[in-house]
Amino acid sequence: MNKFLKASILCPMLVLGMSQASAAVFSSEQVIANQQFNFNKQQVLSYVDSAEVQNKLIELGVSPADAKQRIANMTAEELSALNSQMNEMPAGGIVGVVVTVLVVVVVTDLMGLTDVYPFINPI
């Protein structure tokens, strides 16, 4: 009886545990878009790693770790737009980067996704 009980438990587990593997073809556009997204994210994060930007963030009351977390959660379109704006800025435009990151933080606070600024009430 004990063997029958074990077999009745193991058989469904084996049958349900076996799933079919599927493979898909990735187009060149998908691979390029994914690589561009990763490149944009790394480039924006490298700006936040600079001492000047980190000092400005701290001065404005935002921790660099929070800013990096917000950047990591951005969509591909948001990252692309932010990265293109930063690339078009002059060398002294690092303050614009900080302002842009702060705008992202305020928007996420308004949406109720974060609670960085206690004076902002979510919508």
Image: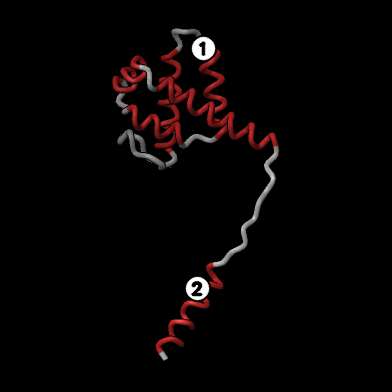
Tell me the tag on residue 42.
Answer: none
Tell me the tag on residue 13.
Answer: 2
Please state which amino acid type lies under the numbered disc 2.
Met
Q: Residues within 10 Å of mark 2 (few under 14, many from 20)?
A: few
Quadrant (top left/top right/bottom left/bottom right) for the N terminus: bottom left
Residue 92: give x, y in percent of width and height: 44, 8
Please state which amino acid type lies under the numbered disc 1.
Met
Looking at the image, which is closer to me, 85 or 109?
85
- Residue 52 lies, with reference to residue 43, above or below; the image says above
**Residue 23 falls left or right of residue 71:** right
Q: Which quadrant of the figure has residue 85?
A: top right
Q: For marks 1 and 2, give the CA distance.
A: 59 Å
Residue 16: give x, y in percent of width and height: 55, 71
Q: Residues within 10 Å of mark 1 (few under 14, many from 20)?
A: few
Residue in the image at 47% along x and 24% along y: 44
Residue hosting label 1? 89
- Residue 4 lies, with reference to residue 100, above or below; the image says below
